[in-house]
Amino acid sequence: MSKRTPLSFNIKKVTPAPVTPVRETGLPATTQAGQHENNAETKRASKQTSKPADTERKKGRAGRQFLAAHVLPEAAKQFKLLAIQRDKDIQEQLIEAVNDFFAKHGLSRIAD
């Protein structure tokens, strides 16, 4: 077994390797880099961009804290089925559950 490097070792600065220019082929930039898209992905992307962004935009994650719990698989399945039956996503149901928990304990329903 080899000896571990001490935490106080000196780090030498490494210069980055020179960038080699990409050969122009006349193709779009995504295919020049070797990324090939199939027609299904392209159609899916065009459908997503055709939706109005203002009406269906959800709130971002900025300024939010992640909460999680480990539950039995049956409980997770039941929670997901309830989301389908109520036509809500899991995020909305979790926010509702947190707000109900706050109300149960006499606190403000501030989860949003």
Image (spheres, helix red, strand yellow):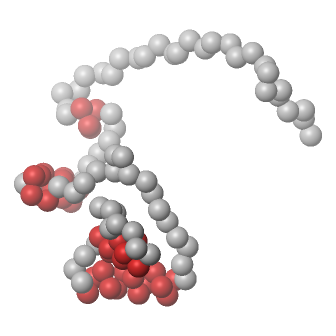
Q: Position of residue 74 (x, y in %)?
A: 49, 87
Q: Give me the residue at 28% from left, 51% from top.
A: 60
Image vertical order of residue 100 relative to residue 25, above or below: below
Residue 90 position within the rendered picture, expressed as x and y whole percent measured from the top left? 34, 72
Q: Is residue 17 visible?
A: yes
Q: Is residue 16 above or below residue 99?
A: above
Quadrant of image for the C terminus: bottom left
Residue occupying the point 20% across, 32% down: 27
Q: In which quarter of the view is residue 94 placed?
A: bottom left
Q: Is residue 17 left or right of residue 60?
A: right
44 lies above or below 80 = above
Quarter of the N terminus within the rendering: top right
Viewed as shown, does residue 50 lie left or right of 90? left
Q: Position of residue 71 (x, y in %)?
A: 54, 78
| Residue nearer the viewer, 105 or 3 | 105
Question: Relative to the observer, which residue lies in front, 31 or 76?
Answer: 76
In the image, farthest residue toward the front: 106
Residue 43 seen in the figure:
no
Q: Residue 44 at x, y = what percent?
A: 18, 58
Count up the numbered dots.
0
Q: Is residue 82 left or right of residue 11?
A: left
Identify the residue at horizontal 41%, vertical 17% (top origin): 20
Q: Is residue 62 above or below residue 89?
A: above
Q: Residue at x 83, y 26 (%)?
A: 6
In-front residue for pair 53/46: 53
Which residue is nearer to you in this view: 86 or 16? 86
